[in-house]
Structure formats: structure tokens, C-alpha cells
Image: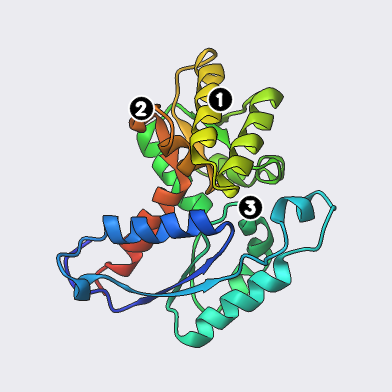
Amino acid sequence: MNDMIPRKILGVYGGMGPAASAEFLRLLAAMAPAKRDQEHPVVYVYSNAQTPDRTAAFFGRGESPAAALRQGLDTLCGWGADLLAVPCNTAHIFIDPFRAQLRSPLIHIVEATVADAIKAAPDGCWIIATGATMDSGIYEKEAARRGYRFFAPSEEVRELATQAIVRVKAGELKAGGAVMEEIAAKLWAVRRAPIVTACTELPLAYDASSLPPEMGISSLRSLSRACLEALYAEE
């Protein structure tokens, strides 16, 4: 990244959930190599908390979010967004089938997070996420493509991850942090390796815990980094 003023516009499809989207925008501001307002990127936000539940849809228990996601991303392109970002991991399961048809490039949260995991822990990381993200294999496929591996958590840990996500979505960050500490204790009793928080609520739970920051790899932070690298790239 250089210190030039970014000329590209970032379009963000948010609301899945609102707290995670707000944290993503905070990270964009905090991590940007800017010294004054005018050196920050222009960001268009399309926040749709009414997007159908991604996990429910994946397991056949609800409406698919694909149409809403496509409409929102197309709207951002119509507004003039040069790059797109979606701070929701599970949403990418539904975006991938039409990703190539989007008028602007999508900064992919899975690709960005796997890249950061490889740098942080070349020998492998734990991964926790929604049940849909885990069962879809979207992270494992990207890791395999890059010759990397994730350590699979137990079913008990997967259920705890769901509890932490629910707590954060309900605004109960302290409770979410407590669940995250329980998750880490169980994972690190097996293998002391960093934990990839591959649902965008989970980094908020991790940050609300007393766990060491260097042992958590946030998909929100990874997406922010990748977006900023693209926005500030020399043309």
C-alpha cells in the first residue's frame, strides 16, 4: 500500500449482522494508511439486515439469500462501486455461483482470510464458523488450493461457536467472549494453534474475551486488509 489518495470506490453489502458490518467499517478506518479525512476511501454501504438467513437456507430450512445478495451487489455496482465486499462468510456460499457475473470485482473474505492464516501459522490453524460455512467446505477448498490445511473442531466446539454467534447477534458481547474462552480452552487442549474466526460475529466475541490477540485470526480484519490493499494499490 502507498499513501496516495484512493481513487477506487468500495461497495459494502452489510447487515449480516449489523454489529459485524459496523466493526468492518471501523477496521477500514482504523487500518487505512490515512492521515486526514481526504486520504480515506469513498465507501458506499448497502445494509440489508432483512437478507434471508444464510445458514437456514443452506440447510434447506428457509429462503435462499441469493436473490437479495445479487440485487444488493448489483445496486452497489450501479451506484459506481469499483470494488465489492461482503462482511459475512456464509453469504459467499451463495455469491460464488454468480461472482463472475458481477460488474465489479469482489474482494473475497475466504481468500483473504486463508492468505492471512498461511502467513500467521504455516503449519495450520483451527477454524470455527457457522454450521453452513463448516459443512460447505468453502474454507477447506481454498486452503487445499493453496496447499494449506485447517484443523477441524469437534462437534461440541462447533455447537459452542454457534452459541457465541447467537450471543453477539443479540448484543451480548461479554457472554460471547465467555463462550469464546471456553472454545479456546477445548481447542488448545488438543493443539496450540491460532483460531480462525470465520464467521464475522466471532471476531467480536474473541475481542470481548481475555484471549491473546495474536492467537486469533479475524476474517473481518482479513477482509479489511485485502480491501485496503486493493483500494490503495498503485494504478
Relative vertical location of residue 60 with respect to residue 71 in this rendering, above or below: above
Q: CA distance from mark 2 to mark 3?
A: 26 Å
Q: Quadrant of residue 212?
A: top left
Residue type pointed to by label 3: Thr
Q: Position of residue 193 (x, y in %)?
A: 45, 23
Seen at 50% across and 55% down, the residue is: 19
Q: Which mark sits nearer the N-terminus, 2 or 3?
A: 3
Relative horizontal placement of residue 119, taking residue 16 as reference (left or right): left
2 or 3: mark nearer the eye: 2
Q: CA distance from mark 1 to mark 2?
A: 13 Å
Seen at 39% across and 49% down, the residue is: 221
Name the residue carrying label 2. Answer: 212
Relative vertical location of residue 96 with respect to residue 202 in this rendering, above or below: below
> Which element is circle 1 on?
helix
Residue 140 appears in the picture as rendered: no
Name the residue carrying label 1. Answer: 183
Q: Which numbered circle lies on residue 90? A: 3
Q: Pick out the residue farthest to the right.
A: 60
Q: Alpha-carbon neighbours of circle 2 within 10 Å: few (<14), some, or many (≥20)?
A: few
Seen at 54% across and 42% down, the residue is: 172
Q: Which mark sits nearer the N-terminus, 1 or 2?
A: 1
